[in-house]
Every structure is written in structure tokens, then in C-alpha cells.
Image (tube, rainbow, N blue to C red):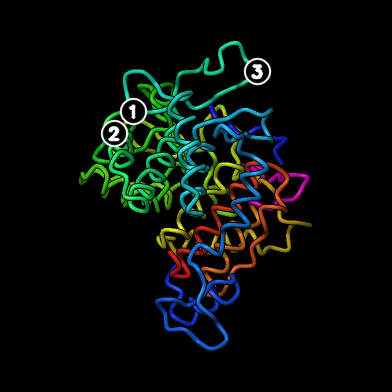
Amino acid sequence: MQQREQNRKTGGIGRRGVLRYTAALGLGSAGLGETADMPAARADSLTVPSEWRIFRDRFVTSDGRVVDTGNGGISHSEGQGWGMLFAEAAGDKERFDLIFAWTSTHLARPGDALHVWRYDPNAALPTSDPNNATDGDIFIAWALARAARRWQEPAFSIAGAAIATDILNKLCVQQSGQFYLLPGIQGFASAKNFNLNPSYYVFPAFGALAQLAPSPDWDMLRANGLSTLQSALFGSWGLPPDWLAVSRPGLELAPAAGWPPRFSYDAIRVPLWLTWADVMPPVMGKNFLRFWQSSAFPYRPAWINLEDGAFADYPAPSGMSAIASLTMAAQAGTAPQLPSVADAPDYYSAALTLLSRMAASQMAGAE
């Protein structure tokens, strides 16, 4: 479920680093003390209106469906959640309402507050797989939490709280005193092991979800997620895989069977979330930098096999490069040089770019 098709191509930065961010990214220094050469600007100027408009015009239909142009024009809960996040960050309530309405109408699952993960407009039954995708539900709930705060809409809080509650109650598993986040309700757990997707640990969202549905389990999920990621580093580069197997009862970790053992299109989001939430473990930060800055490759590869070291015969697209730039800049305390959504070859790369810009805006103190 939700495996990327292969053809689709820490730390505090201090006041000086924040000012470098705001200057390079076109943001004002509101709240930091303005300077003569840094006029005040809207906090959202990093991503909107121009970057959001580019994304919206390319990938969002007039009725609120976010189209994955790299996967045959399907839609999924991930994209709907991201579209809602972007619209909220842009202050575009009209489009937020449309995306949320489409999502609720076409992806709502019966019996819980979660969402069907995939919608294929060309299929006789567009939602033939009723399973959810946990990351999509996290993004939708996170967007609702942000929207409720921005627009003072209690209905958004109520809807987001229902999703957050079901994430804890239906998508988390306890094993040997640890608390894990399953990628979906069905198909990821057996008597021998269970599979995780490390990129589904969306650390910058957990605080907002904890406010929607207060529970100490959020702290446990965050802490166990961080400890798991620090132990799930493989290959000569010490990178996390797209999919991770956890054995029962010993909790041994290995790249999950059934997926290529790669740091690739899913795992690229791990450094994004760790950087955005400012919880990057030092060893992971060093490993990411060593990989991205290495002269061992003729280009920055889109993926690398963590078992045999083979790497993609094409470079990482702009969205993956945006995450690399964001992560390396955060480690160095400098401003990232981020591409535009207009440079993205498809939906996924555009979304990663816009997410990186949102993260950079928050790190600059603009959110």
C-alpha cells in the first residue's frame, strides 16, 4: 500500500541564523526586531501566495481533489492532507474548505474517523482498497488543527480530534513496553513482526494532535519514534529505510521484506520531519550530511540500496533536493537555498518543496 512507484523520479540556529533565514527567504524580522535592510513582511510570504498558487493551479482541481501527476492522476489521503496544510498556510480558506469537503465526501471510511488511502478516478470503484494510510490521516488532522486556530472554526477542531483519537486507538501498537505507529489498520502486523514506515512519524504534527486529543500516549509515541529511528540506520551510510520490520518479541530491526531496502522516496521525509520539529539526533544529522555531501556519487542520487550500495541512475528531483538543502542548512545554521514549486517535475516533488518551505518559515520564526 502506498509504495512509491520507482519511475517517480539540528538544532537551534540562534538569532543570527534566524536573521539569515529571514533575509535569504524574503521574510521580515517581525518579532525579532526589525532592521533597516530587512523590512517587515507577512509571515506567510515564504510560501504564499505565489508558491501556493503554483501548486494549486498545477495539482488541485476546482472541486478540491489533489492530483498525483506522477502516479496516473490518482489522489490519496496524503495529498489531500498536504493540500489542506498548504491552503491553511496560505490563508486560502475557500480552497481549504473545498479540499476538506472533497476529502470527507470521497475518502471517509465508515465506522471510524479515518480515510481511505487511495482514490483512482479511472476505476469502476475509485476506493477499492478500504485501508487507510496513517500519514494521510495525520496530515488531515494537523491541517484541521491549524485551520481551527487560524479561522476560529470549532467544527475543524471536532473533526481533527476524532481523527487524532482514532490514530491513537486504532493505529498504535504496544510491544515489550514500546509504542509504535502502524502505517495502516490492516496488513502491517503479524504474530512474528510488524512493519513500520519511518516517514510516518510526523514529529512537527504531534503537538497539534495532542492538543486536539490530549493523551500521554503522544509523548510516548514521540519518544519511542525517535529512539526507533536512531536504531534503524543501515548500510555504509547509516540511513533509514523506506520500510522497517520490527520483530516480535525481540524488537530487532531490519529493512522490511516486500519493499526494496532503500533510502528513497518515502524515507526522504524522515530528515524533513526531524529538522522541522528540531529533534534531529546528532548521529542522524551527520549521516545525512555525509551522504548528501559525498563525492562518491556523480550526482545526488534519488535513492540508494542500503544492502549493496547500488544507487539510482538518475539524480534526486527538486523536492528531494529541497529537503537535503533544508537539512544541511539547519545543521550549519545558515539559510537554505530552496527551489520553487515551479521547478518540480510532478506532484510529489512539488509537495516536498512546499513542505520544506513551510518548515524553513517556521524555523525562521515566521510561524
Q: What amino acid type should be assigned to the residue bearing mark 1? A: Ala
* Residue on which disc 2 sits: 162
Amino acid carrying label 3: it is Asn
Vertical placement of 127 versus 89: above or below? Answer: above
Left or right: where does residue 21 sit relative to residue 152? Answer: right
Figure quadrant of residue 299: bottom right
Q: Residues within 10 Å of mark 2 (few under 14, many from 20)?
A: some
Q: Kindly identify the residue that appears in the image at 53 percent across and 25 percent down.
A: 118
- Tell me if residue 318 is in the magenta stretch: yes
Q: Which residue in the structure is indicated by mark 3?
A: 122
What SS does tag 2 mark?
helix
The amino acid type found where label 2 is placed reads Ala
Residue 236 seen anywhere in this rendered image of the structure: no
Q: Residues within 10 Å of mark 3 (few under 14, many from 20)?
A: few
Q: Are marks 2 and 1 in contact (CB under 8 Å)?
A: yes
Disc 3 secondary structure class: loop
Identify the secondary structure beneath mark 1: loop
Q: Quadrant of residue 277?
A: bottom left
Point out the stretch of residues depicted in magenta.
305-319
What residue do we see at 57% from left, 69% from top? 329
- Across and down, in percent, residue 4 comes to 61, 34
Left/right placement of residue 31 relative to residue 219 reads: right
Few, some or many residues within 10 Å of mark 1 (<14, 14–19, 20+): some
